[in-house]
């Protein structure tokens, strides 16, 4: 299954990728037509569209890492996050829009994984753009059928006693995984803890880094 860890690199050190020169799909053509129509009618401008794209591109997993680190260090916030992640993250200053955000906590007994079986619904406001493998058909289908095998390919092997739960995102509902806090981090600051939180750990395909 394709994901970020490729063995075959180009001379520049970057993974080889197929050329994206296929004909536009129906939906891509429709998006272009609607966008041009909105600009033509004065409802939006190219500058507005560019600004929105740049704002989305500026979002990164560092936002979600701040949320996780605070949940690790602030029991009251952790409870609020698990009860209503949308409100809790807005209170931290993150604009997640009208989406219903649900926080899932990984423990010794339960490990959570996120996917979107239909397309690529993803908590972009907190984690930035999804990785290519998250959008792949292989990940979307195999994670439902054989989550432990997929986890193993990401380097995560769980005890048989740990239940793996797979959660399907929708157009109006997103998830963020709160990974287990690594042992030996009791003296670390919230900022130092945030540096241990990886993007994959907030999707459920990875674990937080050990210090």
Image (cartoon, helix red, strand yellow):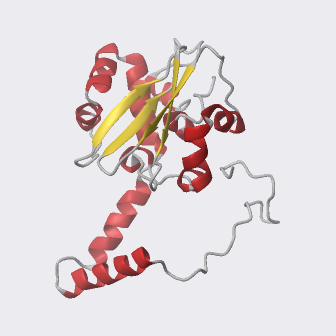
Residue 180 is at least partly visible in this image: no
Looking at the picture, tell me which residue is in the foreground, 66 or 101.
Answer: 101
Q: Quadrant of the C terminus?
A: top right
Residue 184 spot, x, y in % from top left: 60, 12
Residue 189 spot, x, y in % from top left: 47, 21
- 61 is higher (above) or lower (below) than 77: below
Instruction: Name the residue rendered at 53%, 40% in the picture.
Output: 199
- 42 is higher (above) or lower (below) than 62: below
Instruction: Name the residue rendered at 44%, 51% in the picture.
Output: 128
Instruction: Name the residue rendered at 30%, 79% in the picture.
Output: 35
Q: Residue 137 occupies which quadrant of the picture?
A: bottom right
Looking at the picture, tell me which residue is in the foreground, 114 or 44.
Answer: 114
Instruction: Name the residue rendered at 32%, 24% in the picture.
Output: 82
Residue 155 spot, x, y in % from top left: 70, 33
- 199 is higher (above) or lower (below) than 161: below
- Looking at this rendering, what residue extends furthest in the bottom direction? 40
Left or right relative to 99: residue 24: right
Left or right relative to 145: residue 129: left
- Looking at this rendering, what residue extends furthest in the left direction? 42
Q: Residue 21 occupies which quadrant of the picture?
A: bottom right
- 108 is higher (above) or lower (below) than 120: above
Residue 102 is at least partly visible in this image: yes
Residue 16 spot, x, y in % from top left: 74, 65
């Amino acid at each position: 299954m394709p994901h970020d860890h490729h063995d075959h690199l180009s001379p520049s050190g970057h993974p080889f990728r197929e050329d994206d020169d296929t004909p536009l799909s129906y939906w891509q053509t429709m998006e272009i037509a609607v966008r041009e129509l909105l600009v033509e009618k004065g409802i939006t401008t190219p500058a507005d569209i560019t600004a929105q794209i740049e704002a989305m591109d500026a979002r990164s997993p560092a936002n979600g890492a701040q949320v996780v680190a605070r949940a690790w260090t602030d029991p009251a916030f952790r409870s609020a996050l698990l009860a209503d992640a949308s409100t809790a993250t807005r209170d931290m200053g993150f604009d997640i829009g009208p989406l219903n955000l649900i926080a899932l906590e990984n423990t010794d007994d339960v490990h959570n994984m996120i996917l979107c079986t239909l397309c690529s619904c993803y908590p972009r406001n907190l984690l930035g753009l999804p990785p290519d493998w998250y959008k792949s058909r292989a990940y979307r289908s195999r994670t439902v059928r054989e989550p432990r095998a997929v986890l193993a390919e990401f380097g995560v092997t769980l005890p048989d006693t740990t239940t793996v739960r797979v959660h399907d995102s929708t157009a109006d509902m997103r998830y963020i995984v709160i990974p287990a806090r690594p042992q030996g981090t009791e003296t670390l600051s919230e900022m130092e803890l945030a540096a241990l939180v990886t993007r994959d750990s907030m999707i459920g395909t990875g674990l937080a880094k050990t210090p």
